[in-house]
Amino acid sequence: MLLSVQDLTVSYRTRGGELRAVEGVSLDVERGQSLGIVGESGCGKSTLVRALLRVLPPNGRITRGRILFDGLDLAALPSAALRRVRWRRIALIPQSAMNALNPVMRIGDQIVETIVAHERTPRAAAHRRAAELLELVGVEPHRLADYPFQFSGGMRQRVAIAMAVALRPDLIIADEPTTALDVLVQDRVLGLLQRLRAELGLTLLYITHDVPVVSELCDRIAVMYAGRVVEHGPLRAVFARPVHPYTMGLLQASARGTASGPIVSIPGTPPDLLEPPAGCRFTARCPFATAMCAAQDPALAVVGPARSAACHYAMDAGRMREEMERHDVWTAGGRVS
Amino acid sequence: MDRGGTGVVTAVFTLEEVTKRFPRRGGGAPITALDRVSLTLRPGEILGLAGESGSGKSTMAELLVRLQTPTEGRIRFDGGDLAHLSGETLHAFRRRVQMIFQDPYESINPRFTVRGWVEEPLLIHRTGGPAERLAGVREALERAELRPPDAFLDLFPHHLSGGQRQRLSIARAIVAGPSVLVADEPVSMLDVSVRGGILRLLRALRETLGLAIVYISHDLSTVRQITDRVAVLYRGSLVEIGPTEAVMREPRHPYTQALLSAIPTLSVDGPPRRRVALPLEDGPVPEDACRFAPRCPHVMPVCRERRPALVEQPAGHAAACFLHAPDAVAKTSAV
């Protein structure tokens, strides 16, 4: 196992008290695999990324759990040792490359700096590698001399990808890398990531709110809700037979419908994490919730081959999926999203 | 209400060869945000305006609500020229055409209560006494599905979720009894799980209030879910327009085809999605050429020499492309 996140909890100190943005999250990523982490705003996916890279804001800290990366516990690693792991072994493709690139430094120099800062490589060799990297991501090598502002959004994102793969890291974390891009540009970047995965055998942790994007890029999927992983498993199996009602709703709401078809939404809003409910955090929005759901917090339990879900009624998933076929199940009783 | 087919079409808005140019910062040739666009908005219809950034769709929204006026061409509202409105007639126009913005956080003044925010348009338009206005606010909240209205009246925006804020914007937009809503990316900043609720609401308001809605979005999947017709813009030009399902099922313009093929799907079985890899957008295109010619996979010599007109094909479906109308002349007519 290349990455094994075990029972990770990340808390922020806030004026309202302690906020557990990520609570008891466990995830595994094998070498060469691609795991998509999907969820909506406030689900904890960005905090998870920050915790993995140990770049939490000053009021945030890892309060429990381990992040085992190739045997090293990143959660406990001193910062000097961490610097040897970050970027060289774990690289990040950020949401906005503009924020990641130095605006007053030529692209080529930035890639060269990245390489020589982490490897004993002569500058000339690093420069040649930078040109190869641009070619790899479909940017003409002569643009090494250009500054970030001279690139379009899609081109900058390609440069960010080139920098992420520059040191051949073991793991690449992509944090919503196409969210800010236009449809056609997004499509090219997704195509590029698919190709790089195949050519370089990348191990990818792909964070996004956009479920369809995951379907083209990932082998496995983890669905997060209100700080927890609520479902985790092979992409095909989860898409075909979701077990958690939130996953069912998210998939329905993400489907590309037609004018005559139903428009699905999930009524209500996620709970306030300063005062999380006692039971299942999806109770208030779940069409199948019972008294038990409000009282008892379901644990993530095995529900199939390499699959887990956190729902008291996981055994009943077949019946729930059937009822979901009637899309008005979400709005029954006049509930409004 | 006439939704096409009988020849004469009544229209709420009619755009006739509308061009909008903006001066370039630091001088130089002006930027053409919209280039000779002609189309109509029919009573009671939901018309989608789809395009990527730089397509001119937001400029279109600003022209429709008269935050901007065309550089050339004309926009008619209920038969009258928008550019000629002033004073009382402009005031009346502003009551009848309302806008909903993309960002439900930035577009609402945080110091207003829900009641104050929804009531303000009634004060601006000097409608009714206090009791009447409160009744109007309650009704608008009810229609926007902020129920029960009394539970929301005294809340501030920070008490509301993103979806509830967008409902608040909609309540404000409908409170003074408009006939048209211009919604600029109204769900793109909302979580996927709540988008559908706003889309259903817009559809419901069209039915109950008989509103015509201009739905502007870069996201063709939501366009497909709620619009009757869709207009596709590319770099300021209208490249295709038609009944939404017809355009989605059989896109005619190569740009529309590329846009549709670029949408990831949930499907995990079957062959992988075919990618139409277009060359990247490059520099300026000559005035008398198709805007899309430099990137078009089907480009022909004529595309670089003449500008294709929007030519209507069966059932109100039209595309500006020489592939479909080899003898397209450069004079367009409203579709």
Image (spheres, coloured by chain):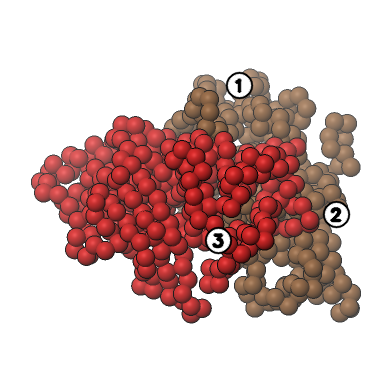
Chain colours: A red, B brown
What number is the disc on residue B323? 1
The chain to which mark 3 is attached is A
The residues tagged by marks 3 and 2 sit, at their Cα atoms, a distance apart of 44 Å
Q: Chain ID for label 2? A: B
- Give the chain of mark 1: B
Q: Which residue is mark 3?
A: A297
Disc 2 or 1, which lies upstream in sequence?
A: 2
Q: Characterize the local packing of mark 3: few (<14), some (14-19) or many (20 or more) Cα atoms within 10 angstroms.
A: some
What's the residue at 79%, 56% (across, down)?
A333
User: Does the image show residue A264?
Assistant: yes
From the viewer's perspective, is residue B177 above or below residue B80? below
- State the separation of the CA atoms marked 3 and 1: 61 Å
Front residue of B200 and B215: B200
Q: Secondary structure at mark 1?
A: loop
Please name the amino acid that badge 3 sits on.
Asp
Quarter of the view holding residue B309: top right
Image point 83% across, 70% down: which residue? B138
- Above or below: residue B328 compared with residue A179: above
Residue highlighted by disc 2: B209
Name the residue rendered at 64%, 22% in the picture.
Answer: B324
